[in-house]
Amino acid sequence: MDELTRWVEERGITEIECFIPDMNGVLRGKVLPAGKLPKSPRDGSLRLPSSVFAVTVTGEYADIDGDDETFSDPDMILRPDIATLRVAPGMKTPTAYVYADAHHPDGTPWASSPRHVLKSVMALYAAKGWRPVVAPELEFYLTALNPDPDFPLTPPTGRSGRAESAPQPYGLEATSEYENLIDDIYEHSEIAALSLDTLIHESGAAQLEINFIHGDPVALSDQVLIFKRIVRQVALNHGVYATFMAKPMESQPGSAMHLHISLVSESDGHNLFAVSSGKDSAQFRHFVGGLQTYLPQVAPLFAPNVNSFRRMRPSHSAPINVQWGKDNRSCGLRVPISDGANRRIENRLPGADANPYLAIAASLLCGYLGMTESREPTQQVTGNAYLHARTLPKTLEEALERFARCEPVRALLGETFVRAFAAIKETELQAFQGVISSWERDHLLLKV
């Protein structure tokens, strides 16, 4: 009996959920009998149509120019990543889940897979003897049930029988309003072996933030998507919604996915962002310089939806530029207080709605270009960074136009992925632009 079969039988697993994250970070895939999983790597029997990487957030298919596979829709061979095999919490039937990587029949990876894109970026670092380490911080809201999308979201009722009506940043009493729900999140996350750290109440009404323990970028991206799934399911079990929209409510702050990034030597594990005295290294400065140069050009990778740009407003706890500063949260790029061994940069630009594989890949690619091109950063900001000019795009339309011109990053991402990603985002943007909003009916219907 091989190790995989033994693992399944010891836990009484009868079904396996096989995950393929799509361009938007939505988990797609298939459910299979547990006995089929050990055979699939050998016989290639686990397959999925390649159109999974052409699906928009609305469930439509984007037409990808120059890609005949969009129409022929050939099968991809799925190779389960056995290192990701975990018990799936909260299921009535004993179930496990596993991530799979998509390949062509000849064994080459499927280039438009976001998980493959991040692995390719990691390979660039490995070729230099570098290993990136990341720690995501993920914000989300709990809301009352909202079956009609024409009505605004509202905070849910807590244990006290009342809903939050004012901000309660870092409030422990406010957090305890949702104690039972939070306990279930931690319990399910422990079953799924997620590397969770602290949880706090954020600035918004019923807004929470979870910190992940630092680790491998691919593994942490896997965990972020599982965590989102767990939170949504637990919230529904408690009669509320959980949302990772970047800006779910007009009067409340947006939700971010802050990324703490450091870089260590593959040979001895020392932090390459600091010299022996503890001061910033040249590599650290160049990494920041790369973030400042290229992040404003690749915003769709960390702000992928029309709603993403509603979050990026001055004085709303969301950056509008790529200024950097020590322990300065008004900056898009913050340097947390730390000794040399823990030197890192916090990228505060990504929203909670971002695909973690692509947001992390974008951050690492921009930093990589900064180091290989020896990009120097600007002077650090010590005051209010919101007073500096906005350098981030204001809309998804503008962001896509900038992304189309950013040749250095596009070249590293690969033309196959870039074409597919851009087509999906353009299709989603066109769908949004065809919607008449309640604001338009309210203010224009009987006045203009």
Image: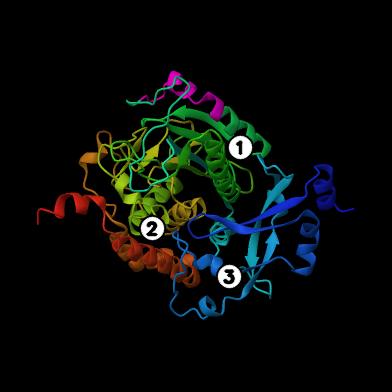
Q: Earlier in the sequence, mark 2 or mark 1?
A: 1
Provide the secondary structure element on which disc 3 rests.
helix
Q: Residue at x 32, y 44 (%)?
A: 311
Report how many numbered discs are placed on residues in the image.
Answer: 3
- Disc 3 crowd, CA 10 A, few/some/many (<14, 14-19, 20+): many
Compared across the picture, whether 438 is left or right of 342 comes to left
The residue type indicated by label 3 comes to Ser
Relative vertical location of residue 423 with respect to residue 34 in this rendering, above or below: below
The residue type indicated by label 2 comes to Pro
Provide the secondary structure element on which disc 2 rests.
helix
- Cβ atoms at labels 3 and 1 below 8 Å apart: no
Q: CA distance from mark 2 to mark 1?
A: 27 Å
Query: In the image, is residue 172 part of the stretch drawn in magenta?
Result: yes
Residue farthest along the left direction in this orientation: 448
Residue 90 in which image quadrant:
top right
Provide the secondary structure element on which disc 1 rests.
loop
- Disc 1 crowd, CA 10 A, few/some/many (<14, 14-19, 20+): some
Compared across the picture, whether 78 is left or right of 392 comes to right
Residue behind mark 1: 195
Residue range in magenta is 168-181
Given residues 219 and 153, the one toward you in this image is 153
Residue 370, horizontal then vertical, whole percent: 41, 55
Q: CA distance from mark 2 to mark 3?
A: 22 Å
Q: Residue at x 62, y 68 (%)?
A: 109
